[in-house]
Amino acid sequence: CSMNIIFTDIDGVLQINNPKKWNKKCCKLYSDICNELDLKAVVTSTWRVHYKLRELQEIFYSHGIDVEIVGYTDVLGIERGEEIQLYLNDNPCDNYVIIDDNVRDILPYVQNVVSVEKSYIGLTEENINQIRYAISKK
C-alpha cells in the first residue's frame, strides 16, 4: 500500500492505566508524529471489540488526535502479532510501525515494534524517535 500504517494500542499508550483517562501529552505526541510521517491508524487495541470504526474515529478526534483510522485488525483469538501479520498479508504495506505497551505476543511475528515501556506513563518522546526510525528505514 502507498500509505504508512501505525498499528495502535490504546490502553497504556494513549490512555494511561492510572487513572483510566486519555493523556493529553501522549495524544499530542501521537497526533503530531502521525501528521509528520503521514501515518494512518490501524487499531489493534481491545477497544476494537467494543467500538465501531466511526466511533473510534470520533473518540480520537475528541482527544485532539487528528489521525485517520483506516481499519483494525481482526479479532481472531490468536496472538496479536499474528493478527497484525494477517492484516499485512491482506493489505501489503512497506511502511508500518506498531506501538504497544505489551509486545510479548507481537514480537515473534512482525518487525518495527515500538514498545511503550511504562503503561502508567504511555507514549514518550523516545518512542516518537523509535517510530521515526522504524518508518524511515527502508
Image (cartoon, rainbow, N blue to C red):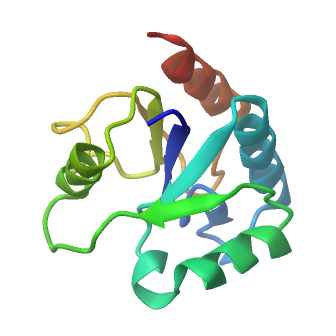
Residue 33 image point, x, y percent: 73, 35
Residue at figure coordinates x 41%, y 75% from the top left? 46
Left or right: residue 110 versus residue 69 is: left
Left or right: residue 35 versus residue 20 is: right
The answer, for residue 19, to whether it is visible in the render is no
Residue at figure coordinates x 51%, y 33% from the top left? 2
Picture layout, residue 70 above or below residue 124 = below
Residue 41 image point, x, y percent: 57, 53
Nearer to me, 12 or 78: 78
Q: Farthest top residue?
A: 138
The answer, for residue 31, to whether it is visible in the render is yes
Split into 4 quadrants, where in the image is the C terminus? top left
Nearer to me, 13 or 86: 86
Residue at figure coordinates x 17%, y 73% from the top left? 76
Nearer to me, 77 or 21: 77
Nearer to me, 19 or 64: 64
Q: Farthest front residue?
A: 2
Total marks shown come to: 0
Split into 4 quadrants, where in the image is the N terminus? top left
Picture layout, residue 129 above or below residue 42 = above
Snapshot quadrant of residue 11: bottom right
Left or right: residue 20 versus residue 26 is: left
Left or right: residue 75 versus residue 59 is: left
Residue at figure coordinates x 68%, y 73% from the top left? 57
Residue 128 image point, x, y percent: 66, 30
Residue 3 image point, x, y percent: 55, 37
Snapshot quadrant of residue 119: bottom right
